[in-house]
Image (cartoon, rainbow, N blue to C red):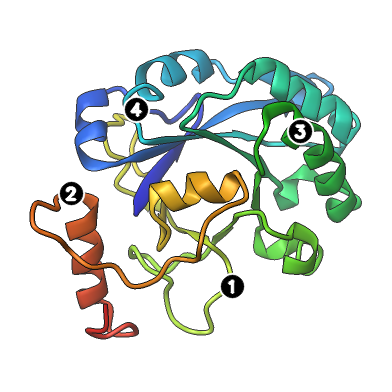
Amino acid sequence: MEFCDGNQWHYVTDVELYVREREMYEMRTCSADPKRGYRMYVDTQFARQRGLLQPRMRAYLHYQFPYEQAGSPEVQAAFFCDTIGALRANEMVMLDTEGASGLRNPADFMRRWCALVEPRLGTLAWIYVPSALADSLTRAVTGPRIVKAPRYSGHAGKGPKPWWPHDVWQYTQTGHFIGSPHGPGDCNVTEWTVDQLLARCKGSAPPPGRRTLRLGDTGEDVRHLQRLLNDRSIGTEI
């Protein structure tokens, strides 16, 4: 399953095109501005993108880009929750930890952020783990949460071995951002289905396994099968 992620500079304007091609969308909710004393702000496209795409998507992911200087994990988490309000049935959330965030203790920040966000919104969070923080945000730290990581293979797959043990791969920063006039952008891929991702955020989902096409299957199921057939590392076993 593939999806794109956006922000106030790079977002979907052709909703019908995006909806035809993708089941999920990821959009930045809020961050802080280093040029204004790290004052937190809501992404200028947050409300519009949510209004246009969330009702049309099978899944919609909100994310926050934190900064060490923007306040405690609890302050930033509360701002994130206040911005979102009530989480809708097809929505999930992610903490977008980056090297540029300057977090002194990424593991502690993540735990404290999740301790506020998860019970308040009633969901397990996703965690974005770049290579710069991979030694801090290990599986032992992120626990049962979905982990997304950059793995720039250049195509919709894991890329060459060794594979990172993550659930979702951002496979390019310069991919075809469907429905956006703002040029190439971030594209992501996962072996999990939308239903599995949503269930996992509720704490109940088996790992992705073999999938069988049935009469009448269309869209993502067929594309998933084609990717498997094209991926030499997987071969023809489906």
Q: Say which quarter of the image contains residue 74.
A: top right
Q: Is residue 42 left or right of residue 6?
A: right
Residue type (three-letter) at the residue carrying disc 1: Pro
Q: Residues within 10 Å of mark 4 (few under 14, many from 20)?
A: many
Query: Which comes sooner in the sequence, label 2 or label 4?
Result: 4
Q: Is residue 25 visible?
A: yes
Per the image, label 3 sits on a secondary structure element best described as: helix
Compared with 68, 151 (above or below) is below
Query: Which disc, if any, is residue 165?
Result: 1
Q: Is residue 202 left or right of residue 68?
A: left
Q: Residues within 10 Å of mark 1 (few under 14, many from 20)?
A: few
Per the image, label 4 sits on a secondary structure element best described as: loop
Cα distance in 3D space between marks 2 and 1 = 27 Å
Residue type (three-letter) at the residue carrying disc 3: Pro
Disc 4 target residue? 12
What is the tally of numbered marks visible in this picture? 4
Cα distance in 3D space between marks 2 and 3 = 34 Å
Query: Which comes sooner in the sequence, label 1 or label 3?
Result: 3
Q: Residue at x 26, y 85 (%)?
A: 235
Q: Is residue 14 visible?
A: no
